[in-house]
Image (tube, rainbow, N blue to C red):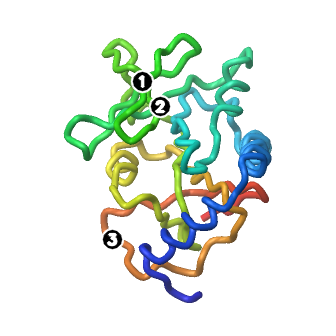
């Protein structure tokens, strides 16, 4: 596939992801957890941003990563996103074992908003980014809402953007409809390994 439109990549990836069994999802999520600590300097980060999974849609299960970091003596602090009432922007809050979680209207678990626990995008050292597919230049296909592109554009220079894919596939050659506002990834982690861009 030389150049593919995002909509076609999104449809195909969603279908392949829906076909995964719960056991396969768990196995691949464990491979992602192990791969993150094998391929990236996690212990050097002060703040890691990650998404809480919508398991009904077979998203990568980030809870094994979260539990390992909560149990570690020295680890980055964790932050997770909350979709704002405007429907287009995110705020970010510290995620600790005592953080109450609220299910959003989309069925996504989110930290209960607490102004004292808000984390600014400029504080983050690394962001685990959900995706359905990516290309060889690091451009990603998500659900199409643009939440993460707007968020990543607010992060500091030097922050590391790592796509997290439950599908064990190599990046496509190119996407046909990359926008000027699309923020490319630095790497994509799959169950089988890592792609650097």
Q: Which residue is the site of mark 2?
A: 109
Q: Residues within 10 Å of mark 3 (few under 14, many from 20)?
A: few
Examine the rendering and report whether any part of residue 194 can be seen.
yes
Q: CA distance from mark 3 to mark 1?
A: 33 Å
The earlier-in-sequence mark between 1 and 2 is 1
Q: Determine the image quadrant of residue 193.
A: bottom right
Q: Which residue is the site of mark 1?
A: 102
* CB within 8 Å, label 1 to label 2: yes
Q: Position of residue 192 (x, y in %)?
A: 79, 59
Q: Which residue is at 49% across, 28% downward?
A: 79
Q: Which residue is the site of mark 3?
A: 179
Secondary structure beneath label 2: strand
Q: Position of residue 111 (x, y in %)?
A: 43, 23
* CB within 8 Å, label 2 to label 3: no
The earlier-in-sequence mark between 3 and 1 is 1
Q: Relative to residue 84, is residue 11 drawn left or right?
A: right
Examine the rendering and report whether any part of residue 35 can be seen.
no
Using the image, determine if residue 190 lies above or below residue 124. below
């Amino acid at each position: 596939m030389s150049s593919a439109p995002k909509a076609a990549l999104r449809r195909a990836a969603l279908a392949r992801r829906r076909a995964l069994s719960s056991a396969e999802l768990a196995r691949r999520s464990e491979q992602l957890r192990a791969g993150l600590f094998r391929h990236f300097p996690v212990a050097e980060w002060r703040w890691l941003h990650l998404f809480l999974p919508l398991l009904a849609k077979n998203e990568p299960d980030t809870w094994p990563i979260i539990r390992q970091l909560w149990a570690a003596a020295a680890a980055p602090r964790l932050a997770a996103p909350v979709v704002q009432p405007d429907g287009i922007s995110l705020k970010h809050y510290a995620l600790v074992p005592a953080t109450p979680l609220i299910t959003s209207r989309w069925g996504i678990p989110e930290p209960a908003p607490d102004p004292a626990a808000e984390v600014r995008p400029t504080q983050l050292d690394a962001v685990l980014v959900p995706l359905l597919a990516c290309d060889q230049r690091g451009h990603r296909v998500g659900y199409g809402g643009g939440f993460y592109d707007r968020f990543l554009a607010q992060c500091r220079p030097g922050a590391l953007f790592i796509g997290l894919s439950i599908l064990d596939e190599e990046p496509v050659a190119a996407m046909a409809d990359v926008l000027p506002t699309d923020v490319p990834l630095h790497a994509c982690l799959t169950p089988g390994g890592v792609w650097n861009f």
